[in-house]
Image (cartoon, grey):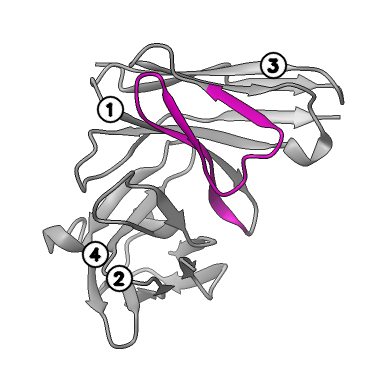
Amino acid sequence: NAGVTQTPKFRVLKTGQSMTLLCAQDMNHEYMYWYRQDPGMGLRLIHYSVGEGTTAKGEVPDGYNVSRLKKQNFLLGLESAAPSQTSVYFCASTSGTPTEQYFGPGTRLTVT
Amino acid sequence: AQRVTQPEKLLSVFKGAPVELKCNYSYSGSPELFWYVQYSRQRLQLLLRHISRESIKGFTADLNKGETSFHLKKPFAQEEDSAMYYCALSEIQGAQKLVFGQGTRLTINP
């Protein structure tokens, strides 16, 4: 079991460029989440999905889009990157009952 | 509004001393409370959750609904406890979205 994996691990973008972050889980979890981690602010929820084909906005969704075409994958897109999106991005998944969320290793994104 | 507050950004204690990481929350209803930990160069992982009422690695946390607190405690700190600790809450039903505190970086000095 690989658990939750994220691709890529690191990325540097120029302002205005686009990219997609991929999250994959092999635990057959229904729920998946994207968070961003910024110093002094903890983790904040960007978007989440409660099942294949469904997505919803979290606390800080502006500038991001997501898709959940397959149950095991959750993609986070940045259409036009901005320096304010420099952060560490974490994906997580859970089975949907009150239990722990399993986190990926993170993607460190720098936008210059 | 849901909110989790960890008042200490940094906490430094000596090995063998007691540790208490503070967490206060605001939530309309009865949330599920968690402590997550991130060791150096490792991914975020669950340390303990209120509903299971267990002790993990010597840590315990008691939910005080009157004070809306969920402080994390350990009687004797060890060097391997040095890490970033996050308190978090989620709704018991629904999408299980986590709301995190700002985090406390704990350093255990030898």
**Residue A19: mark in rendering:** 3
Name the residue carrying label 2.
Answer: B29
Local crowd size for mark 4, using a 10 Å CA cut-off: few (<14), some (14–19), many (≥20): some
* Cα distance between the residues tagged 2 and 1: 24 Å
Residue at 26% in and 44% down: A100
Q: Are the residues at dot 1 and dot 4 in contact (C-beta closer than 8 Å)? A: no
The N terminus of chain A - image quarter: top left
Label 4 sits on what residue type?
Answer: Phe
Residue at 34% in and 78% down: B69
Name the residue carrying label 1.
Answer: A30
The answer as to whether the residues below labels 4 and 2 share one chain is yes
Residue at 28% in and 27% down: A30
Q: Is residue A55 above or below residue B7?
A: above
The answer as to whether the residues below labels 1 and 3 share one chain is yes
Residue B93 falls within the magenta-colored stretch = no
Segment tinted magenta in the rendering? A41-66
Q: Position of residue B38 (x, y in %)?
A: 43, 46
Q: Are the residues at dot 2 and dot 1 in contact (C-beta closer than 8 Å)? A: no
> Dot 2: what SS?
loop
Label 2 sits on what residue type?
Answer: Gly
Give the camera-side residue of B41 and A32: A32
The answer as to whether the residues below labels 2 and 3 share one chain is no
**Residue B59: mark in rendering:** 4
Q: Is residue B32 above or below residue A81?
A: below
Which chain is indicated by disc 1? A
Q: Position of residue A87 (x, y in %)?
A: 67, 38
Q: Magenta segment, principal secondary structure?
A: strand
